[in-house]
Image (cartoon, rainbow, N blue to C red):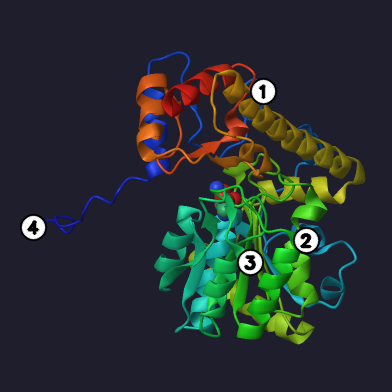
Amino acid sequence: MSLFAHVEMAPRDPILGLNEQFAADPRPNKVNLGVGVYYDDEGKLPLLRCVQAAEQRLMEKPAPRGYLPIDGLAAYDSAVKALVFGADSAVVRDGRVATVQALGGTGGLKIGADFLKKLLPQAKVLISDPSWENHRALFTNAGFPVETYTYYDAARRGVDVDGMLASLRAAPAGTIVVLHACCHNPTGYDLTPAQWDAVVAVVRERGLIPFLDMAYQGFGFGIAEDGAAVGKFVAAGLDVFVATSFSKSFSLYGERVGALSVVCASKDEADRVLSQLKIVVRTNYSNPPTHGAAVVATVLNTPELRTQWEQELGEMRTRIKAMRQRLVDGLKAAGVQQDMSFITQQLGMFSYSGLSKDQMVRLRTEFGVYGTDTGRMCVAALNSRNIDHVCQAIAAVLR
Ligand code: PMP
């Protein structure tokens, strides 16, 4: 009998499944709001000007492609630290942060998860309810039991902070808590600064381990504002894990550029932690790829390119906000009676629309508007050409 005779077919990734269905849909006015990708107003994936300029500079002095160090390009790692913790951060200056280049934000999460499993084999992981689906799968695959903390309040359209704090208070010391640093995926609802303070206090009191996932820095209010939660954990003197992704903020999805940073109590601790993170990398894929990190490091470390990046990131953020507003206005104009203004209060690429699974299925089958069954829509895929059709379609299923 064949070795693989009993291998079961794994369930399809729901979003990729949706993409396949979308690709096969012959309707010319179909719209894919299922993805987690930013498109420009032409409906195209942008290639940022700062990225092109960095690539041009790199091409002017073509470099051979030797192996990078296990922890990645040094100029990249230091740029990540400055971005995540601030250019004049004391923890960075004191050498208390261990940073490794990773294969996207997902890679950063996975290196952290594997390291934590060795450090705390009995711990459990808490993710938000709901969360990015891969959080559960990734930490489960790393060997952790994964449970949820209260997060989304559907009735009040926002975060159930009291419920969240109660969940955290009930967690045993040493529980790993995965938090979305900004632009919560899928709901679009973030904590306010004061609510973050309350979360930080409970995490500290209860001896929990904060693991911040920062996949959308710059898509909420701005680079510094969106990174503020990290600063609060650091200021409270906590050991914190931060996974960084540049997939969205640099529109470098396929280059797999991300990082993991771990804040430690001393330089000596950080050196030892870094040595362990390097073992995780070494035994999984040896060392990271060169190109994406070289591009991001060039942009972040070259003042005029950095300025250009901030401008382009700002353009993406502003366009998304404009689309949220047009969606709210368009729904009203299309006769929707409910107050849909909550869409403009949400942050980042997604809107949790509050539509039911049946309504989402109708959007897809009757109108060719594709979102996930949970009601999540990618507002970053709306543009001036498809917005009217989307408004008409949503209005029809809400009627
Ligand atoms: N975390 C969250 C919350 C995300 O939404 C995503 C991407 N969709 C990631 C991590 C992973 O990002 P990357 O593509 O850089 O691995």
Amino acid type of the residue tagged 3 in the rendering:
Ile
Left or right: 382 as drawn, with respect to 223: left
Q: Pick the residue in front: 58 or 17.
A: 17
Looking at marks 1 and 2 on the same chain, the residue that comes earlier in the sequence is marked by: 1
State the mark number for residue 134.
none
Q: Secondary structure at mark 2?
A: helix
Identify which residue is drawn at 52% across, 17% down. 389
Identify which residue is drawn at 73% across, 70% down. 197
State the mark number for residue 70.
3
Residue 286 visible within the image: no
Amino acid type of the residue tagged 4 in the rendering:
Met
Q: Gap between marks 1 and 2, in whole Å?
A: 29 Å
Q: Is residue 68 above or below residue 311?
A: below
Looking at marks 3 and 1 on the same chain, the residue that comes earlier in the sequence is marked by: 1
- Sort mark 3 into few (<14), some (14-19) or many (20+) by Cα contacts within 10 Å: many
Q: Pick the residue in front: 198 or 82.
A: 198
Q: How many marks?
A: 4
Residue 132: image location, x then y, percent: 50, 53
Q: Gap between marks 1 and 4, in whole Å?
A: 54 Å
Residue at the spot of label 2: 228
Residue at the spot of label 4: 1
Residue 136: image location, x then y, percent: 44, 62
Q: Secondary structure at mark 1?
A: loop
Identify which residue is drawn at 43% across, 69% down. 146
Looking at marks 2 and 4 on the same chain, the residue that comes earlier in the sequence is marked by: 4
Residue at the spot of label 1: 41
Q: Pick the residue in front: 237 or 398.
A: 398
Looking at marks 2 and 3 on the same chain, the residue that comes earlier in the sequence is marked by: 3
